[in-house]
Image (cartoon, rainbow, N blue to C red):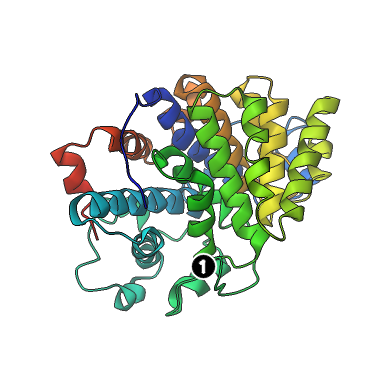
Amino acid sequence: MNAGRGGDPPPLDRYTGCLLGGAAGDALGAPVEFLTLRKIRREFGEGGIRNYVVAYGRRGAITDDTQMTLFTAEGLLRAVVRMRHRGIAHMPSVVRHAYLRWLVTQDPSARRLLPDGADDGWLFALPELHHPRAPGNTCLASLYGEQIGSMDAPLNDSKGCGGVMRAAPAGLLAHGADPFRVGCQIAALTHGHPSGWLAAGYLAGIVRALLDGADLRDAVESPMQRLREFPRHEEVRDAVARAIELADAGEASPETVERLGGGWVAEEALAIAVFCALAARGDFERGVTLAVNHSGDSDSTGAIAGNILGAALGESAIPRRWLDDLELRDEIRQVAADLRTVYEESEAWRTRYPGW
């Protein structure tokens, strides 16, 4: 891992936009995740769901997608601290410890899996995170096991979207590192099929390109060359290419979204998010609303589209009504700011992210 410094950081608004945008898409899609498009329209009208409704006991509730995104960020930041102050860090292992802390928030009996002293951190101390929010079976099963999944030693053959939906922080952090590879590594902790982790690397690459100043179209195409370096990349390549083709055709409707699949697997979730981000034509609300109104994994596709559009447009593009009711809004904003602070660390930052 290389946690080098240098250069000016991108605007804070892009960091907060990415994580808050993902959380807003997650919260908007949560109540309709398991509904067909027909049922969504029957309940919310022809335009589908456009405002938060109660899920998990409150309006604006986040799901496991945002929970795991936050713990991904925590793990990455702890790895940076460990590298800077101890000179060595295996980033996937540090991130896995963060995921084990998340696992305990879903199942307190999993505390036995944590190394001594690892049940700490300010995120773990937030009571709002200690609620199961439909966690994915692959993530749970992988973390309960003793082995650490990797690209070279997969734990399973899963390509579910649980790897890609949490990968945006790899693009936000990756100053001095390879965001594509980091995204792949953290997804491979739980998802062993190449499409499961290559889609995560691709999302991280998009986010980093946006923070580096690329326009949206260039950003969604920029990781393609990196993708082609890996064997068995064809599913992700073809899914993204199809998304770009449909966006160019100008058919921005839920029916078009469903031509890309349901988003339950990684390459489909990424493709839907890419399509909706491009079809939004610079309108955050339009893109995220499109991303959740379909017969599929609405919270995950909404979260990924929100990550992309938030990184592209900034926090100011997110509708105020969505931000006002968003669960853990201030804490998500803090994590986003901490990812940017990697450029100029502070004592408070190091205290929040001890290097283990």
Does residue 253 appear in this view?
A: no
- The image quadrant of residue 112 is bottom left
Would you place residue 44 above or below residue 295 in this image? above
Q: Quadrant of the C terminus?
A: bottom left
Q: Which residue is mark 1?
A: 150
Q: Would residue 125 appear left or right of 225 to someone viewing this image? A: left
| Near-viewer residue (229 or 129) | 229
Q: Image point 42% across, 41% down: which residue? A: 174
Amino acid identity at mark 1: Ser
Q: Would residue 131 appear left or right of 271 to someone viewing this image? A: left
Q: Image point 48% across, 58% down: which residue? A: 186
Q: Would residue 152 appear left or right of 126 to someone viewing this image? A: right
| Near-viewer residue (267 or 232) | 232
| Near-viewer residue (231 or 351) | 231
- The image quadrant of residue 8 is top left
Does residue 94 appear in this view?
A: yes
